[in-house]
């Protein structure tokens, strides 16, 4: 008697689809990651300090953040309708987003080379003039999450459980909806601290004794990670109530962003006992 053995079905996502579903975002994520090598080299060789840190620290942080963002978009692209991904409009839009991100990192590296501020720079006319344009680019690159989220929301053929489908779409949409108002206020505030800050949290740089608008901004930009994770946990642990739990998670995350934003406006640090 012959017994047919079938290969076990993998539950892991096919990462090869990153290149087929979102080649521009995948390539950009790789470029941003590889660019960390010369950035770390510059940091090691740099003898100057800017506000107590290497001027290359900010470009390094942004490269990590933008590489993660573009890689997340590349992964989520598989849940969009194939027809949308193949459309000329989508290809032009992704190209514009890529240009916006590249412009942002070039701007940050230029500021590091000059050992000056990239944001809120009123001492160098060129940086003051280009700041508004960088704001437009920031809105453009963030809008990718909104466009993708709405496309996934309307796609009934994602192959995902309904709650997980909802969490992916909501995470992307909330990333835009929460980030834009917080970032808009931050850019117009002429600084991210509210009050005089003398101590900061290691790695994150958040103030320990003043309000810091970057906390709300950080939480807002990571909604596209938090919500899908909550959806995945809900589907695994409480499938019967998974959809309701996703909505609860989305509401809670939005409330946390609003809370930390208002907390910063009142000059109060987030979790001051840390650091």
Image (cartoon, rainbow, N blue to C red):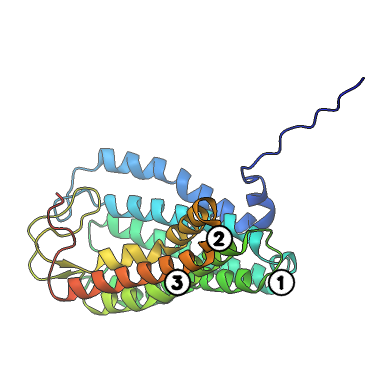
Residue named by callout 3: 174
Which of the 4 quarters of the picture holds residue 192?
bottom left
Which of the 4 quarters of the picture holds residue 92?
bottom right
> Which label's residue is closer to the chain start, 1 or 2?
1
**How far apart are labels 2 and 3 at the CA level?**
24 Å
Give residue 200's position: percent from left, percent from top. Answer: 14, 55
Which disc number belongs to residue 64?
none
Which disc number belongs to residue 88?
1
Give residue 71's position: percent from left, percent from top. Answer: 52, 53
Residue named by callout 2: 240
Secondary structure of the residue carrying numbered label 2? helix
Q: Which residue lies furthest to the front in this view?
A: 240
Question: Relative to residue 266, is residue 76 depicted above or below?
Answer: above
> Which label's residue is closer to the chain start, 1 or 3?
1
Q: Are there few (<14), some (14-19), or many (20+) residues within 10 Å of tag 1? A: few
Which residue is at the front of the view, 108 or 145?
A: 145
**How far apart are labels 1 and 3 at the CA level?**
26 Å
């Amino acid at each position: 008697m012959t017994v047919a053995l079938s290969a076990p079905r993998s539950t892991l996502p096919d990462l090869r689809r990153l290149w087929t579903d979102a080649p521009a975002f995948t390539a950009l994520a790789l470029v941003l990651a590889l660019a960390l090598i010369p950035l770390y080299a510059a940091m090691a060789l740099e003898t100057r300090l800017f506000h107590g840190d290497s001027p290359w620290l900010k470009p390094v942080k942004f490269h990590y953040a933008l590489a993660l963002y573009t890689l997340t978009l590349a992964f989520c692209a598989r849940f969009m309708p194939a027809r949308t991904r193949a459309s000329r409009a989508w290809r032009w839009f992704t190209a514009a987003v890529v240009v916006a991100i590249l412009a942002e990192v070039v701007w940050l590296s230029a500021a590091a080379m000059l050992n000056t501020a990239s944001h809120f720079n009123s001492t160098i006319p060129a940086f003051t003039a280009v700041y508004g344009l960088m704001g437009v680019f920031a809105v453009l690159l963030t809008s990718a999450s909104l466009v993708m989220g709405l496309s996934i929301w309307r796609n009934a053929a994602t192959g995902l459980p309904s709650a997980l489908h909802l969490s992916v779409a909501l995470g992307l949409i909330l990333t835009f909806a929460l980030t834009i108002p917080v970032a808009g206020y931050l850019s117009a505030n002429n600084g991210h601290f509210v009050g005089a800050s003398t101590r900061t949290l290691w790695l994150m740089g958040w103030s320990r004794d003043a309000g810091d608008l970057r906390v709300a901004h950080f939480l807002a930009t990571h909604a596209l990670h938090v919500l899908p994770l909550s959806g995945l946990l809900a589907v695994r642990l409480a499938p019967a109530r998974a959809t309701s739990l996703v909505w609860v998670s989305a509401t809670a995350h939005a409330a946390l962003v609003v809370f930390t934003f208002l907390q910063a406006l009142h000059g109060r640090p987030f979790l001051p006992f840390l650091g």
